[in-house]
Amino acid sequence: MRKTFDHRDLQSAPVERAWTIPSDWYTDPAMTDIDRLCVLSKSWQYAGPARWVDLPGAVHPVDIAGEPVILVRGDRIRAFYNVCKHRGGPLATEPECRKTLSCKYHGWTYRLDGSLRGVPKFDRAELFDPDAFGLTEIPVLIWGGMVFVRLEPGGWEAREVLDPITLEPLRFRERVLYDLQCDWKVYVDNYLEGYHIPHVHPDLCDLLTFSEYETRIDPWGSLQSSPIPASDGPYAAGTARYYHLWPNTMLNILPGRMQVNTVVPLGPRKTRVVFDYYTADGGADLAADMAFSDRVQREDQLICEQVQRGLESRGYVRGRYSVEMEQAVWRFHTLLRQAYASIV
């Protein structure tokens, strides 16, 4: 993780006078590890729907900020590193239901609370304390039928950020993955402003009342919102609310439905966007919602990949913000600057 930051790029300024972050923060290969260790690992991450582990003994492996993690239903939902304390073998490679966790490498077994239960062929080891070899537990938050985990302290206080967000009863329905050839921050930047909607998403623009599109910035994220008038489109009349939860989780909350988007860096110029669809029982038309969302996502994918090429060009270094339309982008960049400044 080698990267030299210019201290001037780490300085924050009011949006009216601020410059955007420099292009090499999107293009330098070293930024992949920096973002995982200094940004993603120190914030709450969406791990998936609680429905994945609603049965006793349910185990579900997930990837969190590049780390192998398992969600486990014992007396409650817990999360552990998916790593045996013997020699690092995996405890689960696919979703399953178990009474105990068993290492796929050498057969060490653990109770569902993470304590060590059985160690085959280890009776001759001296000074071996089984209590010192329990699994490493990770903090878990259950909210709105979703599981969030955090690898290290830092970022936002979960209840302060999430509790003010109102949700109607929703259940997980479907997951769709999109792989993009761009840095993860390019996709987040794009999500955080409606500036591009009339130019990139004409059909979405027609569904929203774009003249009343508003952005609110918060200490650890932002909210973009727009009225939805009655239409023949996939969304009923109401309000579209687009929440960004620092750094890489989005909640698209619309009448009768929600899409949870997680932006996962896979490496330089490689990003995966995870779309989880939640709907109210007997409510939204899931097929219509997914078809429309897919069209919007394909439009975002195309423009983000084109922007990545522009950021890699010698013709661009940094830009400025629209005070009216890009406050949330500025807020995201301010938090990035603070995270990077902590390691300089």
Image (spheres, rainbow, N blue to C red):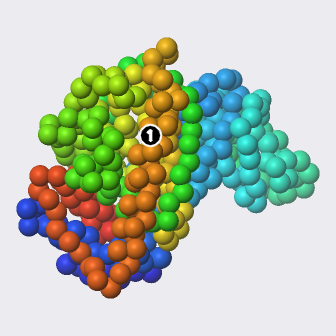
Q: Quadrant of residue 184?
A: bottom left
How many marks on residues?
1
Front-most of residues 48 and 100: 48
Q: Classify 140 as above or below 121.
A: above
Residue at 20%, 71% in the rendered image: 319
Q: Residue at x 29, y 83 (%)?
A: 315
Q: Does residue 187 appear in this view?
A: yes
Is 324 displayed left or right of 112 in the figure?
Answer: left
Within the image, what quadrant is residue 50 found in?
top right
The image shows residue 231, relative to residue 112, as above or below, that is: above
Expressed as whole percent of the image width and height from the top left, the position of residue 138 reads: 53, 44
- Residue at the disc numbered 1: 293
Secondary structure, mark 1, is helix
Q: Is residue 161 visible?
A: no
Q: Position of residue 181 (x, y in %)?
A: 50, 65
For this orientation, the residue located farthest to the bottom is: 314
Residue at 59% x, 51% y: name it: 63
Q: Label 1 is placed on what type of residue?
A: Ser
Could you tell whether 165 is left or right of 272 in the image?
left
Q: Nearer the viewer, residue 241 or 44?
A: 241
Q: Quick one: quadrant of the C terminus?
A: bottom left
Residue 202 shown left or right of residue 90 in the figure: left
- Along the line of sight, the residue nearer the viewer: 218 or 56: 218
Q: Label 1 neighbourhood size at 10 Å, few (<14), some (14-19), many (20+)?
A: some
Task: Give the quarter of the image for residue 261.
Answer: top left
Nearest the eye: 77 or 11: 11
Residue 322: x and y in percent read: 14, 59
Residue drawn at (36%, 55%) of the image: 188
* Image location of residue 26, percent across then percent down: 38, 71
Considering every residue shown, the one lying at the far top of the view is 282
